[in-house]
Amino acid sequence: MFNSPVSRHFRSNAANSNSSTASRQQSFPLKKSNFKSALERIKIPDRFFSGINVFKVGSNGKLEAASLTLSQDRFIISILPRATPRQSNGSSSGSLLRPSVLRNRIKSAGSTGGDSVDGGASDAGSIVSYNQVSDRVDIGSIDRIQSGLNTLRFEMARQKEKKMTMSPRNSSGIPLLDESKSFSLIFRGAKTLDLMMDEGGDREEILYVLTSIIRQYGLAKLKVGNEVLLLRYVWNDVDRDNSNTINEKEMGELLNRINFLVKEKNHGAVYQKFCKTLALDKANRRNGLTFEQCVTLLHKTKRDTWQVKPVTQLFFDMFGQFMNNNKVRKKVSANSFLTRFLQTVQGEKTKTIEDVRNIFDKLQGLELADVADLVSEKDYISLDHFEAYLLSRDNDIFDPLREKYCRSDMNRPLSEYWINSSHNTYLTGDQLTSRSSVEMYIKALYRGA
């Protein structure tokens, strides 16, 4: 599994993976995507949608008044600028104020009409429009959530605070740092979104809700194919008008986001050709493609790009191009998968037929594009299922046994363990110009050092 050439090959060529070249007619209507609505079943207080008052730590270490909101499908966390009472009134004072870039950035956009986390109504004009969102974090990109002031930006904020003499809350409406109200979202490996609750806010409630959503997302993504997962990941960035559809212009951006090389002049042709395949009239073409239709378009476009794609060739090489009835092979049995692939090619000698049946059950439960050729027979999987397995966690190049450790041995002081790091681990960048930060040790430990 973890040392096989097939696993390595598909890890490095996942972006070029495509479906078979045989021409197929699309069935109608398309199945509703369960994955896109997978998080909507989680019950969440309304204030998460209307906006919770927080303070965001900017790149310069300054606190900025903001509002944390969650999209209705629970996939996107947005941080929007908001005015503090001091900024809304426009009053001035001779006292030392903590500067905020919001004074120059906030524009009139109307109130959301929602309640703030402390039960009071949000200030009119405090929540700005979509185009003025300062941060958007996808739930799927979050690696972990940590409490306290343990990131580089919080360190910068503490240093700035030490240089300033002020009351616990000055006339600008910006409070001093409070470790019990602070937390950070660590996403995409190294990025952080550092927040502190406003007065009256409940940090533990936010941490509980976000942790619950992340946990449910982790379970839901195991039940979908790569195309569904990839499209969902970029969907909210591309669907900028929140119409829940992708039009011809947005389709070009979508293809660019997933690094699928289609010349810009051909974006419209690809869109129109697929709309014709779906038998959409002019009005529906203008309205755009649904999520499910876009998944099918991606699968079909990728499939038709290769004359003979690598996974098809591997499939035929291992299991034979033709079946016993002389028809082109479109499925493989559990026994052949075990003996010809897992045990022979992957070198997983300890695998049994029961292991294979468990794998097949998982694969047949995946949400894949409707255009894929799938089989429902218990002891068989299709070529598309086989491709999904090659790119799945079950076929990971890393040996999962090496992740295991004895929890009873993990309660000693940190200094008693061997940690694979160097004397430069604490640096945030190069040795000459970067900062030193304890955050870098935290990242190294989370990466398995």
Image (cartoon, rainbow, N blue to C red):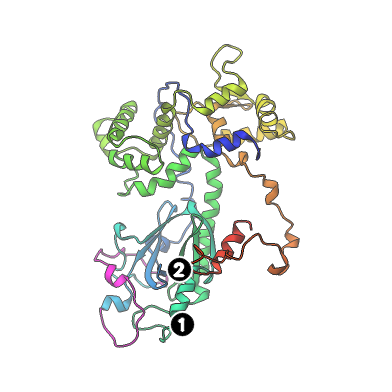
Residue found 42% across the figure and 21% down from its top: 23
Please give the residue where the numbered disc 2 appears in the rendered image. Answer: 195
User: Residue 319: which quarter of the image?
Assistant: top right
Residue 206 in view here: no
Foreground of the two, 245 or 329: 329
Q: Residues within 10 Å of mark 1 (few under 14, many from 20)?
A: few
Q: Which mark is residue 333?
A: none
Please give the residue where the numbered disc 1 appears in the rendered image. Answer: 162
Foreground of the two, 194 or 115: 194
Residue found 40% across the figure and 83% down from its top: 169
Q: Residues within 10 Å of mark 2 (few under 14, many from 20)?
A: many
Q: Position of residue 132 (x, y in %)?
A: 30, 60
Q: Quadrant of the C terminus?
A: bottom right
Marks 2 and 1 close (CB-CB < 8 Å): no
Q: Taking 100 as reference, is 10 left or right?
A: right
Amino acid type, label 1? Lys
Q: Quadrant of the N terminus?
A: top right
